[in-house]
Amino acid sequence: MQKLLILAALAAVPTGQPVLAQTVPANPSVAVAHRDLDLRTEAGARTLDRRIWRAVVAVCGTAPDYDLEGKNDVRQCRRDTRRVASAQADLAIASASRDQNIQVSSIRK
């Protein structure tokens, strides 16, 4: 009888990794182009901000609803990554330089 309980317990233990588990590069990054924007205008700055947000979402990824720790990690990643990318954008807007891309990289630990 005890052998059956042990076998039942072992059968209930998942073997292998879940389907959603993926290896994530240490610091994924996306280049945000802005050559086509006139950063001297409000519309250009808004468009750049939207592009940066999409890049932030792409490099930080998402977490399933049931993974609260993962959700918190993603939120923190997005907050920190957006802060760094926005600082780069502010510099680009200030200089109105259209020669360089803005590099958005995840700063996960």
Image (cartoon, helix red, strand yellow):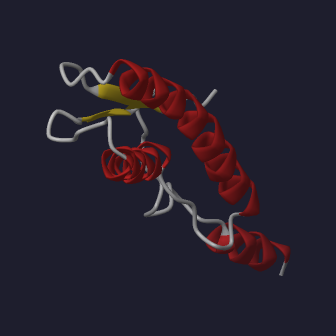
Q: The N terminus is located in which quarter?
A: bottom right
Q: What is the quadrant of residue 105 in the picture?
A: top left
Q: Nearer the viewer, residue 26 or 18?
A: 26
User: Is 85 left or right of 45, judged from the image as shown?
Assistant: right
Which x, y percent locates residue 30? Answer: 31, 35
Image height of 35 relative to 60, above or below: above
Q: What is the quadrant of residue 33 in the picture?
A: top left
In this view, which residue lies farthest toward the front?
Answer: 41
Q: Nearer the viewer, residue 81 or 7?
A: 81
In this view, which residue lies farthest toward the left?
Answer: 36
Q: Nearer the viewer, residue 7 or 108?
A: 108
Rendered residue at 68%/64% (across/down):
67
Image height of 70 relative to 36, above or below: below
Q: What is the quadrant of residue 13 in the picture?
A: bottom right
User: Is 66 left or right of 104, judged from the image as shown?
Assistant: right
Q: Nearer the viewer, residue 5 or 78?
A: 78
Rendered residue at 55%/35% (across/down):
81
In this view, which residue lies farthest toward the right?
Answer: 2
Which x, y percent locates residue 6? Answer: 77, 69
Q: The C terminus is located in which quarter?
A: top right
Count of numbered tags: 0
Image height of 69 relative to 11, above or below: above
Image height of 54 relative to 6, above or below: above
Which x, y percent locates residue 55? Answer: 38, 46
Rendered residue at 36%/18% (across/down):
95
